[in-house]
Amino acid sequence: MADVKMVAEKAPGTGGEKYIPVEERTGNESIVYFTRDLSPEGLRKIYNKVNGNMTGKVAIKLHTGEKDGPNIIPRPWVKNLVEKQPELKDAKIVDTNTFYPGDRDSTEKHRETIAHNGWTFCPVDIMDEEGTAMLPVAGAKWIPEISVGSHLLNYDSLFVLTHFKGHMMGGFGGSNKNIGIGCADALGGKAQIHTRTGKFNHWDIAQEELMERMAESSKGTVDHFGKNITFVNVLRNMSVSCDCEGVAAAPVVTPNIGILASTDILAVDQASVDLVFALSEEDHKDLVKRMTSRHGMRQLTYMKELGMGNDRYILIDIDKGETRISPADAVEGVKPFGTE
């Protein structure tokens, strides 16, 4: 992975290190659903709140992980969902090869890793195996067209199933990172996001520009699918490290919270961040430090500037009769990690 310090030295400090409280946000509100039920049943229950436009050929975009990565979304949860949801019966898990060297930097190695990690109950499509396609990015200042795996265009709907966690470069990895990086092809799109030279380890852009490029890439995919895209973030086993670090990921110290779902990518990522910030100082300090030190809040503010959604939302607790709650309500009674 990259040496983050090389990027950090160039950070302009224009706001991405600052958390914007709910009361300081403006604009419309979207609906975000919440459950504390971290189980196959909980995942299926909340997915059914936002699956109305999952039609035709459905792709499931999730991070299948490096070999033996300990924190990815449990495979049995996804298997249960695919087997029980009629619209997912013929769905495929989709991903692209990685820009950095590792277990998934070629299709051959990637398929070996997928099998090793047990993603064998459902077809897995390596979207850049047979080339790339270009998607326009309306309003972009860095990437007017993003290069994605060509197979992305084979699908009618996209279910973005995300393990929310920290990230060594992005601060956090939510739905925006899942598709912004995860749908971009290995050598073209990922190079567009991370560098100006196209060379791995030539990290020549500032932190907040990286966040903006990632959001622009994500917007290309969001706009392509239109209403036929939905987002679920699983707030469980949240290391400060991404799942791309595999067994080298930092230990998990942040409590498990629950699952969030929305048809608004900004709202679901903003709500995920808000729930982490709503934890006690002791419980959230490591993950919050990772988010802010990497200027991760710029993911959220730039998505709003690009018109990708709302950072204000109505949080609906589906465990308690679909009542409206606050982030503080959602994390009330959360136990320290390892004591659940």
Image: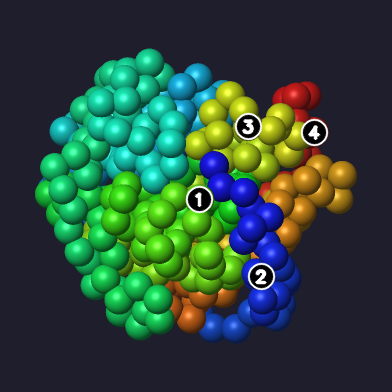
Amino acid tagged 1: Asn
Q: CA distance from mark 1 to mark 3?
A: 20 Å
Which-is-in-front pick, marks 4 and 3? 3
| Contact? badges 4 and 3 (CB < 8 Å) | no
Q: Which residue is mark 2?
A: 11
Q: Quadrant of residue 79?
A: top left
Q: Which residue is mark 3?
A: 249
Q: Quadrant of the N terminus?
A: top right
Amino acid tagged 2: Ala
Which-is-in-front pick, marks 2 and 1? 1
Residue that appears at 48% across and 81% down? 305
Amino acid tagged 4: Pro
Q: CA distance from mark 4 to mark 2?
A: 33 Å
Vertical order, 103 against 134 (above or below): above
Residue 316 shows in this picture: no
Q: Position of residue 221 (x, y in %)?
A: 29, 61
Mark 3, secondary structure of its residue: loop
Specify which label sits upstream in the sequence, 4 or 3: 3
Q: Which dot marks residue 201?
A: 1
Residue 339 shows in this picture: yes
